[in-house]
Structure formats: C-alpha cells, structure tokens
C-alpha cells in the first residue's frame, strides 16, 4: 500500500477527528468504544482469562475492556509506536506491544488469548497482507478462543462518506462482510456470527432494543464478525 497511513501522526488529534466525523451520531466519541465492548460482552461466555486488542491505537477501547473483563490479563498491540506511548501513559498497568506474534509472545501468554478484539483495523491493512495477518491472529488464539472484529460497513453511504473525508482513512480499503468472513475461514477460523450494527444513535436510546433485531440489515454504520479457533 503506497499511501499507508502512519498513525504516529494522528495520536494527538485522533479523538478530535473522530468526533468531527461522527458527531452527528453521538456527541461523545467514547460512545463507540463502549458500544462495541458491550456487544463483545453479550456475545461471549465466561471465563475469559486473557484478552488481546490488536490494533488498539491510543487505547480508546482498553478501559472498557478492563471494566468488562476485570480478572483477565489484557494486552494491547499496534504498529504505531506513538499511539502505544499514549496508551501506556493512560493505562500503565496494561501491557502494550508493538509486535505481537505467537513466536514472540511472553511465557505467560503461550497458551494464547481467549479473546482477540479488533476494531477498525483491517481496512488499513494492505489487501495482499490481510491473509497473513489473519493467520497470525489464528495462532494467537487459545484453543476454542474467540476473535471479534468490527469493521466499517461499505454498503452504508454515510459510512463511505465519513471514510472518504477522514484524513487517517486515506489508505482505507473497506471490506464487505463476506470478504472478511472468507478471509477468516481461509485462515482456519470457524465463523460463528456476523451482524450489522450502529443503526440507532444514543439520543434515541429508547429504540436501542431494535438494534439486535436489525443485525441482518446491511445498513448499519458498521458490522461485526465473531469467529473461533476450532478445537
Ligand atoms: C482507525 S485506528 C483504530 C484504533 C483502535 N482500534 C480504536 O478503535 O480506536 C486503526 C489502527 O490500526 C493500526 N494498524 C494498522 N495496520 C496494522 C497492523 N498491520 N497491525 C497492527 N495494527 C495496525 C493503526 O496503527 C491504528 O492505530
């Protein structure tokens, strides 16, 4: 990918840019992190003893993951050193790694992670590298561990407009849900579930129960896929 975005350059104004792009939906950019982790919590059965957020950026989801899985060991990883530096300042008790592979994992994680959480990362990975990344993630999961990926929904015209206008999305190549599920299957995962999400803004929270019923409708702002490492 020639125009690969370097997120080191966006650490200081990441939240501000996100707020500018998504303010019409939620007045707080934090809403999106909380919303995703809530879906993850409702989709998994305990015990979850170890969690990796792959592509954690400046750590926007980390606090919510900590709250959701208080007894789990939590690791964040990202290729952006500057983003990790910021995340470390906010969460000094969390381990952050710039490179995470099954081969480089420390002893305490050799059994792999029970949950790998990924939000908004795959569309930044060059198409030709995606299978290698998915295969590496497969090796990082514990036996019967789960992977949950959130991605922008390319069928939603508002999402596409946001991506087109967002400076740090200049390298984004969005994935259709079937592209993502095929990729995961090819890497060895069993895909368990996929659903569209982010239909209803928090201001209309009384309509929120509808979200679950709308998972089939390809108009949500994003979608998520749950996959597991088969036994
Ligand atoms: C849009 S940001 C999302 C950050 C975070 N997941 C969140 O929800 O706030 C995308 C992140 O993916 C990271 N990234 C891109 N390619 C990556 C790769 N191959 N491995 C790990 N992280 C990557 C970027 O550095 C950036 O921090």
Image: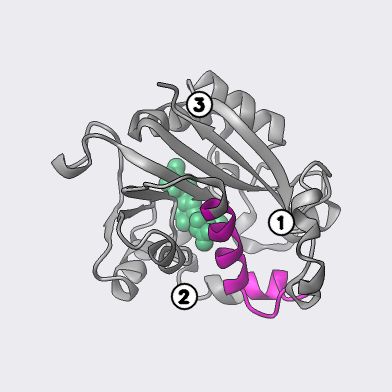
Q: Is residue 17 above or below residue 195?
A: below
Tell me what residue is drawn at x 56 percent, y 44 percent.
Answer: 149
* Residue 91 placement, left or right of 21: left
Secondary element at tag 1: helix
Quick one: 85 or 141, which is closer to the camera?
Answer: 141
> On the image, numbered disc 2 is attached to which residue?
12
Q: CA distance from mark 1 to mark 2?
A: 19 Å
The magenta span reads 18-41
The answer to whether the beta carbon of the residue marked 2 is less than 8 Å from any atom of ligand 1 is no
Which quadrant holds residue 28? Answer: bottom right
Q: Main secondary structure of the magenta part?
A: helix
- Labels 3 & 2 near each other (Cβ < 8 A): no
Upstream in the sequence, badge 3 or badge 2?
Answer: 2
Q: Residues within 10 Å of mark 3 (few under 14, many from 20)?
A: some
Identify the residue at image location x=50%, y=25%: 189
How far apart are the alpha carbons under marks 3 and 2?
31 Å
Judge whether 165 appears above or below 219 on screen. below
State the SS at label 3: helix
Q: Magenta stretch containing residue 206, yes or no?
A: no
Looking at the rendered image, the disc whose residue lies closer to the viewer, 3 or 2, is: 3
Q: Which residue is mark 1?
A: 163
Q: CA distance from mark 1 to mark 3?
A: 23 Å
Residue 150 as seen in the image, left or right of residue 98? right
């Amino acid at each position: 990918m020639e125009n690969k975005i370097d997120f080191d350059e966006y650490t200081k104004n990441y939240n501000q840019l996100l707020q500018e792009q998504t303010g019409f939906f939620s007045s707080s950019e934090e809403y999106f992190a909380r919303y995703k982790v809530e879906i993850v919590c409702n989709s998994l059965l305990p015990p979850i003893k170890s969690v990796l957020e792959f592509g954690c950026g400046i750590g926007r989801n980390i606090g919510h993951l900590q709250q959701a899985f208080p007894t789990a060991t939590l690791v964040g990883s990202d290729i952006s050193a500057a983003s990790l530096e910021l995340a470390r300042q906010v969460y000094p008790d969390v381990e952050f790694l710039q490179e995470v592979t099954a081969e480089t994992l420390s002893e305490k994680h050799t059994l792999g992670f029970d949950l790998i959480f990924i939000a908004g990362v795959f569309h930044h990975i060059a198409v030709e590298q995606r299978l290698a990344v998915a295969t590496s993630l497969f090796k990082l999961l514990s036996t019967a561990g789960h992977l949950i990926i959130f991605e922008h929904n390319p069928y939603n015209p508002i999402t596409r407009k946001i991506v087109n206008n967002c400076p740090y999305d200049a390298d984004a190549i969005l994935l259709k849900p079937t592209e993502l599920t095929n990729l995961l299957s090819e890497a060895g995962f069993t895909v368990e579930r996929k659903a569209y999400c982010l239909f209803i803004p928090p201001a209309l929270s009384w309509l929120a129960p509808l979200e679950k019923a709308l998972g089939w409708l390809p108009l949500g702002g994003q979608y998520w896929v749950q996959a597991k490492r088969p036994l």
